[in-house]
Image: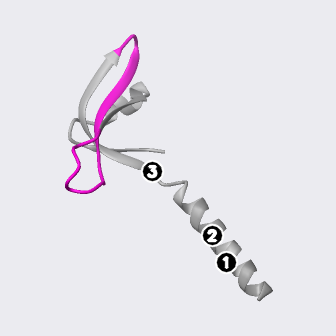
Amino acid sequence: MKSIKIFLGIYFLIFFSCSLHEKSCGEIVRKYVQDDNYFFAMKAFGGNSDADDVYGDVEITKEIYESYDIGDEYCVD
């Protein structure tokens, strides 16, 4: 019985630690610069088909800004 508790504890620890490191990805729908800060406006992937699209902005570096185009997929850590 004790070994089952240890196994389940390790299993849940691994399961939750892996799920915390997932990346959020989305399609870049707009790029803009505001006050010398670079941003992507993104449409989030995932969710169910009944839900409306989810949009969000993410601040990125100039190098990343210049290396992606509208319509590309970008993932945030």
According to the image, label 3 marks what residue?
A: 23
* Dot 1 amino acid type: Leu
- Depicted 3 relative to depicted 52: above or below: below
Identify the residue under disc 1. 8
Q: For the N terminus, which image quadrant? A: bottom right
What residue is pinned by disc 2? 12
- Residue at 32% over, 30% down: 40
Q: Give, as a three-letter code, the residue at label 3.
A: Lys
Q: 33 or 3, which is in the foreground?
A: 3
- Please state which of the two labelled residues, at mark 3 or mark 2, is closer to the viewer: 2
Q: CA distance from mark 2 to mark 1?
A: 6 Å
- The image position of residue 49, as x and y in percent, is 20, 56
77 vs 38, left or right, is right
Please report whichever mark, 1 or 3, sits nearer to the chain's N-terminal start: 1
Label 1's element?
A: helix
Instruction: Give the residues in magenta.
Output: 34-54
Residue for point 77% across, 86% down: 3
Amino acid type of the residue tagged 2 in the rendering: Phe
How far across and down, in percent of the image, does residue 9 sit? 70, 73
Give the number of marks. Answer: 3
In the rendering, at what x and y percent does residue 25 appear? 36, 47
CB atoms of marks 2 and 1 within 8 Å: yes
SS at mark 2 in the image? helix
Q: Quadrant of residue 36?
A: top left
Residue located at (41% from left, 47% from top):
24
